[in-house]
C-alpha cells in the first residue's frame, strides 16, 4: 500500500497576453460590425434625402 501516484492536471492561471489578444480581437470584430451597421444606416438616410430632393417621394400624405 505504498502511495500510488495519480496524474492530475495542473491548473495554471490565465495567460495575460492570451487574454489581451482575445479581447483585442473580439473588440475589433465588434467594432467592425458596428461600423458596417452605421455605414448601412448612413446609406439609407442619404438615399432617402436624394429621392426626396429629386421629388420622387414625398413625406406628405396624398389626399
Image (spheres, helix red, strand yellow):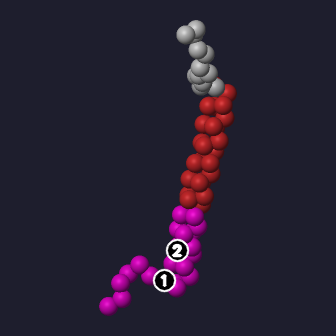
Q: Quadrant of residue 18?
A: top right
Q: Height in image: 38 above or below 62?
A: above
Instruction: Point out residue 42 in the picture as x, y percentages from the top left corner.
Output: 56, 63
**Residue 42 visible in the snapshot:** no
Q: Is residue 41 magenta?
A: yes
Numbered range of the magenta stretch: 40-63
Residue at the spot 61% in from the left edge and 16% down from the top edge: 5
Circles 1 and 2, Cβ within 8 Å, touching? The answer is yes
Element at badge 2? helix
Instruction: Point out residue 23 in the picture as x, y percentages from the top left corner.
Output: 60, 36
Element at badge 1? loop
The first of marks 1 and 2 along the sequence is: 2
Q: Height in image: 49 above or below 62?
A: above
* Nearer the observer, 1 or 45: 1
The residue identified by callout 1 is 57
In the picture, measured across the screen, residue 25 lies left or right of residue 41, that is right
Q: Quadrant of residue 58?
A: bottom left
In the picture, the quarter occupied by the C terminus is: bottom left
Q: Is residue 11 magenta?
A: no
* Nearer the observer, 27 or 4: 4
Label 1 to label 2, Cα distance in Å?
Answer: 8 Å
Q: Which mark is residue 44?
A: none
Magenta stretch secondary structure, dominant: helix
Q: Residue furthest front?
A: 1
Instruction: Point out residue 3 in the picture as x, y percentages from the top left corner.
Output: 57, 10
The residue identified by callout 2 is 48
Amino acid at each position: 500500500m505504498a502511495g500510488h501516484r495519480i496524474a492530475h492536471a495542473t491548473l495554471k492561471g490565465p495567460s495575460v497576453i492570451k487574454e489581451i489578444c482575445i479581447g483585442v480581437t473580439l473588440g475589433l470584430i465588434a467594432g467592425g460590425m458596428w461600423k458596417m451597421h452605421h455605414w448601412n444606416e448612413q446609406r439609407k438616410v442619404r438615399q432617402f434625402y436624394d429621392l426626396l430632393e429629386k421629388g420622387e417621394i414625398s413625406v406628405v400624405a396624398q389626399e
